[in-house]
Amino acid sequence: MSKVLILMGSDSDWPIMKKAGDVLKEFGVEFNVRVSSAHRTPEKTMDLVQNFKGDCFIIGAGAAAHLAGVVAAHTVKPVIAVPINATPLNGVDALYSTVQMPSGIPVASMAIDGSKNAALFALQIIGTYDADIREKLEKYKKDMVAAVNKKDEALQQTL
Ligand code: RP5
């Protein structure tokens, strides 16, 4: 069963949102990817949200990005948002639209184009009940420490 629904306002968001899918694949977590817009296809969006049986949503949207907020309005499952850099405002428009949610309807906003972190956050949610995912996340962090140390050592050799 799909544990995560990656939902995007447009297929133009996919080059960024694909990175979230890649991380979920790496961890062996099933997910679906759909395109539906808060503004262009509001009924379809509501339908997708209400029929999703998994754990959490990852929402990518640019411009006046209301998709994550609209999804959050129709569910009590965690909503993780990725504001997309899609306009001449370089994603600040989407960030502000996403991050300033009114009290009562929380959305966990990542950085602009921060789709990889969105996937890791979703995995942390799944890891609260799935020991296998939790162990994989612990290994992921250890590998990151090793990679940073390796880069530091390599830099020292050049000085
Ligand atoms: C938003 O408008 C989408 O999430 C996308 O980031 C942006 C532009 O969409 P397109 O005009 O490329 O379809 O709703």
Image (spheres, rainbow, N blue to C red):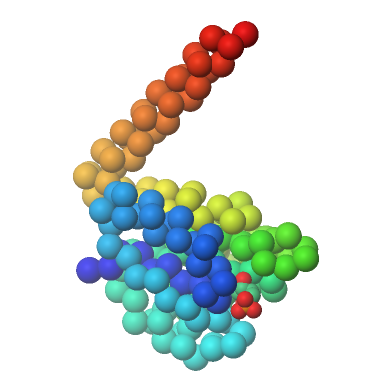
Residue sitting nearer the eye, 73 or 127:
127
Q: Give percent across and percent down for residue 121.
A: 44, 50
Q: Is residue 69 in view from this perspective?
A: no
Image coordinates of residue 19 in percent, x first then y, are 46, 55
Q: Quadrant of ligand 1?
A: bottom right
Q: From this viewpoint, which residue is outermost toward the right?
A: 88
Q: Residue at x 35, y 55 (%)?
A: 24
Is 109 on the left or on the right of 117, as rendered?
Answer: right
Determine whether 47 is above or below 61 in the image.
below
Report x, y in % for residue 52: 34, 76
Q: Nearer the viewer, residue 70 or 137?
A: 137
Q: Which of these two is toward me, 4 or 127?
A: 4
> Quadrant of the image for the N terminus?
bottom left
Residue drawn where x is 31% and y is 33% of the image: 139
- Would you say 30 lies left or right of 45 here? left
Q: Is residue 33 visible?
A: yes
Please give left or right for residue 7 compared with residue 143 in the image: right
Q: Residue at x 49, y 14 (%)?
A: 153
Q: Give the residue displayed 61% in from the left and 85% down from the top.
A: 39
In the figure, is residue 138 to the left or right of 90? left
Q: Quadrant of residue 135?
A: top left
Query: Quarter of the image containing the C terminus?
Result: top right
Across and down, in percent, residue 18 comes to: 45, 61
